[in-house]
Amino acid sequence: MNDDHETTPAHRSGFVSFVGRPNAGKSTLTNALVGSKVVITSNKPQTTRTVVRGIVHRDDAQLILVDTPGLHRPRTLLGERLNDLVMTTWAEVDVVAVCFPANEKIGPGDTFIVNELAKVKRTTKIAVATKTDLATPEQIAEHLLAITELGRATNTEWAQVIPVSSVSGDQIDLLADLLVEQLPEGPPLYPDGDLTDAPEEILVAELIREAALEGVRDELPHSIAVTVEEMGLREGRDESKPLLDIYASLYVERDSQKGIMIGHKGARLREVGKAARQQIEALLGTPVYLDLHIKIAKDWQRDPRQLRKLGF
Ligand SMILES: Nc1nc2c(ncn2[C@@H]2O[C@H](COP(=O)(O)OP(=O)(O)OP(=O)(O)O)[C@@H](O)[C@H]2O)c(=O)[nH]1
């Protein structure tokens, strides 16, 4: 064996899942690491319903980020299924990184998550103090102590505790290094250039859902689901002028909600369609024709048949 071989570090690859209570900054962190908008962020809690992966390609490693829904005390059938999905993801990944926003105190929600996580023995656990740009150095120091203490109280061994800001970019590269350290040796698992393996339909549905939630504020936060019925390049067009046709349904639970979504003379729906179309065009790099219909699925969050139809 020559010296060169001994000094070249082995390539590493593996899966990392960011967890934390709603709004902890998981999706934004995934985007900051990947450097492209592949996961939906919103300032409303619990918008991430689908497992979406971002992929960090480096010469020495491939870091595959699995973005899971937030864990919460289940109240509906949907809630239970989401929690099952979260636990399954935790057991399958190499590292679970728990996000604790530095501008908020550690609370019962965090304790609940860390207690659940403690049941998943084999997975490496890292604590990330997020949003440090919103906290003073003193607050950050106190926060890091509280995280360490929470680890002790729940019998969780943090492999690392690291403060970061996705907005200022502070410590993001260091976080990537620390995560890579925890991955097993192995070859790249995805082709170079892939940013996510989530089917485009899922990303498109999430972008529409995000746009739909944007204007509604507190009126119907969690009663919207979106499915993409059909998506394809329009036939017979010049190759230099492609147009992607997307037919999507936006599900609400009640008549009154349908009214809110449509708005005065359809104004809101047009706004949502336009905002979603612009986001999809930016993501896929193709002009888009978006046909968006509102449908009512009564109590879809509680009905197993509806849930299956909507992809849960
Ligand atoms: N100032 C600041 N804001 C942040 C940072 N990271 C996230 N945010 C904001 O915090 C809010 C929630 O961020 P998300 O990334 O959507 O949080 P999440 O944990 O994925 O949320 P859920 O999908 O609801 O579980 C958004 O308004 C973000 O813009 C940060 O580093 N600094």
Image (spheres, rainbow, N blue to C red):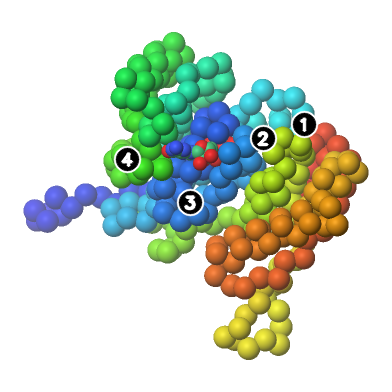
The mark that comes first in sequence, 4 or 2, is 2
SS category of the residue bearing label 1:
helix
Cα separation between marks 1 and 4 = 39 Å
Q: Amino acid at mark 3?
A: Gly
Tell how many labels: 4
Sequence-wise first label, 1 or 4:
1
Pointer 2 or 1: first along the chain = 1
Q: Which mark is residue 82?
A: 2
Q: CA distance from mark 4 to mark 3?
A: 19 Å
SS at circle 3: strand
Helix, strand or loop at disc 4? Answer: loop
* Residue 265 in view in this figure: yes
Q: Secondary structure at mark 2?
A: helix
Query: Furthest residue to the left?
Result: 3
Q: Amino acid at mark 2?
A: Leu
In the image, residue 226 sits, relative to residue 138, either above or below, namely below
Q: Earlier in the sequence, mark 1 or mark 3?
A: 3
Residue at which label 4 appears: 170
Residue in the image at 42% along x and 26% along y: 102
Query: Where residue 140 sits: x, y (%)?
Result: 35, 23
Q: Which residue is located at x 67 percent, y 35 percent?
A: 82
Determine the CA span between mark 2 and mark 1: 9 Å
Numbered tag placed on residue 77 in the rendering:
1
Amino acid tagged 1: Leu
Residue 184 shows in the view = no
Q: Position of residue 254 (x, y in %)?
A: 88, 41
Where does residue 234 sit, x and y in percent of width and height? 71, 79
Depth order, front residue of 212/20: 212
Q: Residue at x 58, y 31 (%)?
A: 22
Q: Earlier in the sequence, mark 3 or mark 2?
A: 3
Name the residue beneath numbered marker 3: 54
Rounded to the nearest whole Å, what is the CA distance between mark 4 and mark 2?
31 Å
